[in-house]
């Protein structure tokens, strides 16, 4: 595994917190594994906290203060270090996504955030937050579109998405919005920016019926899995758990249509929406 990076503590609150954690841990003569044990996390997770690539959660900060006897330092500074423009349950996953060299995703109900158009994203956010004030919705849309700029690079990260047929049949925002959203998917697939596969209704039951799944790989960090539910999400780094979800994704891919057949199906759906527009 790659050694810890040299950080500039002034670069960000999280970098400062990570540098302080490394200093206090070494001062206490503890290894990363020894500090991780009472937190029920791996030594590599502690290394990622110290490197500033993982978010320190409030309960972890309290336990670190207890173990290192730091008089509440980490709990007091945790909030500033974890401030994000994304919802709490997704913030760490969004940050990991930006560092990933490879992203694999299965989406059962909606077009994934990285592939959404502005109008589609707006319809999704209004549906999820029907009583929200408009400035909040616009902030969420802006953050989502900023995430999608990952695709401005022609090759990185490698993005492989399996879409359930429900994700393109469900009319989010109306048929005109759906036609635009699907044509965007087709354009990305045709220019080889995303490997796109469809899981048709005819595939029947499959291993990931429980919900959405995202797998992320990196140059010098452990692989991660992100699973999401209603207003919740978990970013997982336990190797056995990640391996289980990798198998889950592989079995979903095995049940999906080929990229060529998937493009034919999604193009047919786009024609249906466009025909109804006219």
Image (tube, rainbow, N blue to C red):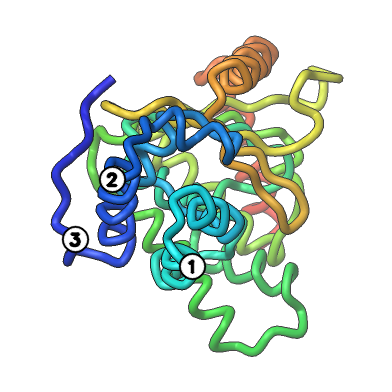
Task: Tell me, yes or no, if residue 180 can be seen here.
Answer: no
Left/right of residue 184 with respect to residue 164 in the rendered view: left
Alpha-carbon span between mark 1 and mark 3 = 19 Å
Q: Which residue is mark 2?
A: 27
Q: Which residue is mark 3?
A: 9
**Circle 2: element type:** helix
Mark 1 or mark 2, which is nearer the start of the sequence?
Answer: 2
| Mark 1, other Cα within 10 Å: few <14 / some 14–19 / many ≥20 | some
Up the image or down, 107 lies above or below 150; here it is above
Residue at image location 42% in from the left, 60% down from the top: 70
Q: Which residue is mark 1?
A: 72
Mark 3 or mark 1, which is nearer the start of the sequence?
Answer: 3
Alpha-carbon span between mark 3 and mark 2 = 17 Å
Alpha-carbon span between mark 2 and mark 1 = 17 Å
The image quadrant that residue 62 belongs to is: bottom right
Say which quadrant the C terminus sits in: bottom right
- Which of 212 and 64 lies nearest the eye of the viewer? 64
């Amino acid at each position: 595994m790659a050694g810890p990076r040299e950080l500039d503590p002034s670069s960000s609150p999280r970098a400062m917190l990570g540098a302080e954690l490394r200093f206090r841990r070494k001062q206490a003569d503890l290894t990363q594994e020894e500090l991780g044990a009472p937190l029920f996390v791996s030594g590599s997770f502690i290394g990622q906290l110290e490197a500033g690539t993982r978010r320190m959660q409030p309960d972890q900060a309290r336990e670190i203060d207890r173990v290192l006897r730091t008089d509440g330092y980490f709990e007091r500074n945790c909030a500033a270090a974890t401030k994000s423009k994304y919802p709490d349950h997704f913030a760490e996953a969004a940050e990991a996504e930006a560092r990933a060299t490879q992203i694999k995703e299965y989406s059962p109900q909606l077009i994934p955030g990285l592939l959404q158009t502005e109008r589609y994203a707006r319809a999704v956010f209004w549906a999820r937050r029907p009583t929200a004030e408009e400035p909040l919705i616009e902030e969420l849309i802006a953050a989502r579109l900023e995430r999608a700029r990952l695709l401005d690079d022609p090759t990185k990260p490698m993005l492989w998405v399996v879409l359930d047929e429900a994700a393109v049949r469900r009319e989010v925002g109306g048929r005109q919005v759906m036609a635009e959203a699907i044509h965007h998917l087709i354009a990305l697939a045709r220019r080889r920016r995303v490997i796109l596969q469809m899981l048709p209704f005819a595939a029947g039951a499959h291993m990931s019926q429980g919900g959405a799944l995202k797998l992320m790989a990196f140059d010098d960090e452990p692989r991660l899995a992100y699973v999401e539910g209603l207003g919740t999400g978990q970013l997982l780094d336990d190797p056995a758990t990640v391996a289980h979800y990798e198998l889950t994704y592989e079995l979903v891919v095995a049940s999906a249509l080929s990229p060529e057949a998937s493009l034919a199906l999604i193009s047919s759906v786009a024609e249906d929406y466009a025909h109804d527009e006219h």
